[in-house]
Image: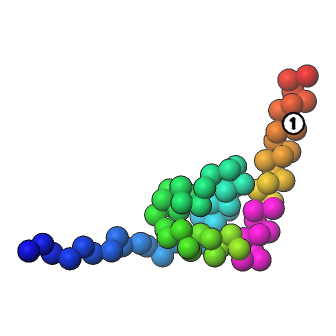
Amino acid sequence: MTAPKRPKPHHSPSVEIMPEAMQMLADGHRVGAVARRFGMRRQTLADWRDSPEGQQQLDAARKARELTRRKGALDVS
């Protein structure tokens, strides 16, 4: 007889990692990959992403990514 499997413990993620997590999502990483990177549940990350604050941070991350991309294109020309 084997012991029942215990669920993996997940620490309560700090909101301090939210900007980096949103940046990774803006860069095209999948929710599951970002959640694993920070040791958090996918649903927690999805809840962050879908919150008003998360949407603001995701929009800011996308704008920063676009500006960086445009600056790089100008430097090449």
- Residue 51 rendering spot, x and y as whole percentages: 72, 77
Question: Left of 63 or right of it: where is 40?
Answer: left
Specify whether residue 56 is painted magenta. yes
- Residue 19 rendering spot, x and y as whole percentages: 67, 62
Q: Disc 1 residue type?
A: Lys
Q: Which residues are magenta?
A: 51-59
Rendered image coloring scheme: rainbow
Specify whether residue 25 is painted magenta. no
Question: Left of 77 or right of it: where is 62?
Answer: left
Tell me, yes or no, if residue 19 can be seen here.
Answer: yes
Question: Left of 65 or right of it: where is 70?
Answer: right
- Residue 16 rendering spot, x and y as whole percentages: 61, 68
Tell me, yes or no, if residue 20 can be seen here.
Answer: no
Question: Left of 75 or right of it: where is 33?
Answer: left
Residue in the picture at 68% in, 61% down:
22
- Residue 42 rendering spot, x and y as whole percentages: 54, 68
Query: Does residue 64 sit above or below 76 in this rendering?
Result: below
Q: Secondary structure at mark 1?
A: helix
Query: Does residue 32 sit above or below 11 in this rendering?
Result: above
* Front-lying residue, 20 or 1: 1
Residue in the picture at 68% in, 50% down:
28
